[in-house]
Image: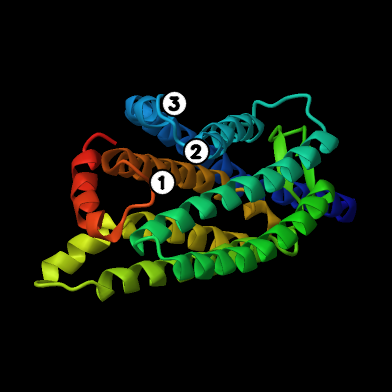
Amino acid sequence: MAEPNTTLQGIIQAGVAELEMPYGALMGTKYVTLIGLVVLLWDYLLTLNAEIRLIWQSTTKWKSAFCVIRYGVLGAIILSTHVTSGFAHNLSDKFCGIWAAFMICYSLLYTGTADLIIVTRVYMLWDCRRHILKTLLIGFIVTYTATFGFGIVTAIDVVDVVIYEPQLYHTCIVTKRPRFLPAIWASQVAFDIYIVMATFLNAADRPRRIQSQLVSSLYRDGLVYFVALFGFRIMLSIISSIPNGDYSLVMPFFVWSMTSLVVSRLLLRMEGMRQAAGALAVPTRQYELTIRREVEISSTI
């Protein structure tokens, strides 16, 4: 009689272990995603006045891009917060698969938009030189083509590996890490490395009288923005490389929130510069004046 009891006990223990295994990753996904949403909403309130003045009351051509970066991401994060909260009852495997595929596809749209904004910013930093724009666009096209290709394959894959767990967690879980998920973010990291190097070389290339001027120039040129994006994408690349699929959803939505925050502020800064200087394409002789005005504008955004 002891042998059947031992076998039953082993089966129960194995079942409990299987249920407990993704608990840490699911709780991490739940709370990290919620933190990202709270930070994004808080930043929205802080920059709302600047947004109205610099985006909606102006003639900027970046209104559509701003909607994609700020409001599209905000809507996606709100939906994802609900799905990963543990309170999403009556979902289905089909819903979870479609939700995950949609998130991958939207990430391609907002990532491409964010990278184009960064290209424009660096183009301004290089005094709007045409050959620099061509070089930046080549780098963007190469890296984004890789991102897009890996993203489409991943969107197809996640339909079958993301399911709904209705008994204990009431959330969508990843049963297997999509094969090309790390490659999506690796190509973005490559783009960020290129942008950061270009920005640093631009600042270092300027004549400087004292070391503090170089440091100040690096700050004004938006290096802080680029390094922040680079750090977030490095973090996401590392997490997405973990073979265990349970951890695939821990960081993406938080990084989305932080990317939206950083790029939205970058776009507001660009529009502040444009309105202060009178045009987006600043002539070289007016560039230093624009940079000084940017410092004044920064206090409002």
Which circle marks residue 61 in the picture? Answer: 2
| Residue drawn 33% across the image and 30% down it | 50
Residue marked by disc 1: 262
Find residue 97 and report its horizontal and vertical position in percent: 80, 42
Cβ–Cβ under 8 Å for marks 3 and 1? no
Q: CA distance from mark 1 to mark 2?
A: 19 Å
CA gap between label 3 and label 1 equals 19 Å
- Left or right, 228 with reference to 142: left
Q: Where residue 138 appears, x then y in whole percent?
A: 58, 69
Q: Which residue is mark 3?
A: 56
Residue 289, how many percent across, how many down?
19, 51
Helix, strand or loop under label 2 = loop
In the image, what residue occupies the spot 54% across and 50% down? 251
Of mark 3 and mark 1, the one earlier in the sequence is: 3
Q: Secondary structure beneath disc 3? A: helix
The image shows residue 225, relative to residue 165, as above or below, that is: below
